[in-house]
Amino acid sequence: MSFITNQFFIGFWINFSLIYMFRKIPLMTKGGWISAGILGTILWGCLSWQGWISVVIYLLFGSLVTKIGYKFKKEKGIAEKRGGRRGPENVWGSAATGLFFAMMTKFNFANVVFFKIGFAASFASKLADTFGSEIGKRFGKDTYLITSLKKVERGTEGGISLEGTLASVLGSIFMAFIMLRLSIISTKYHFIIVAVSGFIATLSESIIGATFQNKYKLTNEMVNAIQTSIASVFAIFALILYSYF
């Protein structure tokens, strides 16, 4: 118990010390930085520095890709608000599922590998989504509604492009690789499951955007939470099926 307490204590001081030093970098709002500090503290306490750095990498690359072609996207009216800076709603909408599975690793009623797979898949899906959305909005030549393949304006909810789809694949593979290198997942089969789950969940997010988001007035953060949950559940079931064969 004292070791766990020490991990949370270390996580708290590292996170909030770094945030104090880098808070003026325009990656997040003030509330976003505070939320990131809370998230980082819990992640460090649950998954040590490996879980923490994996999410730092996710936030860094997600923020950087948002900046690509920002002027162009702003002129088209499809850029992220606040100059691409993440607020509390962005942090928790993207990370709530992963945080849940990170916290579950501290309980002993199930194999911790399943929770780590769920954690990894949630962030693979979110980075895939960010890569696909931001690259697609800037470089996608033609955008099609995923449910009908009807040509639509770039930035349309549920719209996909070849360029954005390829970027999604890259984002999911990249995040799965980071999780593997940090030993959050440990085998090539875990890597494949996480990468595939992340991409499939990204496609499901587009379907939700095309069919349900406007109809039920779902916020982007709610859709993000649904997407990451789909990725985690899919990955866990895939691992269960794999263990039987």
Image (cartoon, grey):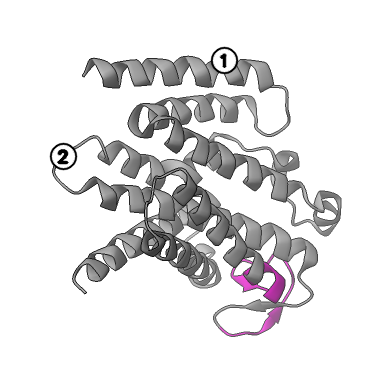
In this view, the residue farthest toward the left is 109
Q: Residue 221: within the magenta? A: no
Q: Give the range drawn in magenta.
A: 148-165
Q: Label for residue 17?
A: 1
Inspect the image, locate mark 1, and give the three-letter code of the amino acid beneath it: Ser
Q: Residues within 10 Å of mark 2 (few under 14, many from 20)?
A: few
Please state if 70 lies on the left or on the right of 233 as rendered.
right
Nearest the eye: 195 or 202: 195
The reply to whether dot 1 and dot 2 touch (C-beta < 8 Å) is no
Q: Is residue 48 left or right of residue 158?
A: left
Residue displayed at 52% across by 49% down: 178
Amino acid at the residue labelled 2: Asn
Q: In this view, does 223 lie to the left or right of 130?
A: left
Q: Residue at x 64, y 58 (%)?
A: 131
Query: In what element is the residue under mark 2?
Result: loop
Work out whether 102 lies above or below 222: above
**Where residue 93 sits in the image (x, y, percent)?**
48, 45
- Residue 140, position in %: x, y? 76, 70
Vertical position of residue 46 compared to residue 109: above or below: above
Disc 1 element: helix
Q: How far apart are marks 1 and 2 (CA)?
A: 32 Å
Task: Give residue 239's position: percent from left, percent from top.
Answer: 28, 63
Q: Pinpoint residue 143: horizontal percent, then vertical percent.
A: 71, 75
Find residue 46 and name its label. Answer: none
Q: Which mark is residue 108?
A: 2
Q: Which mark is first along the chain, 2 or 1?
A: 1
Quarter of the image containing the C terminus? bottom left
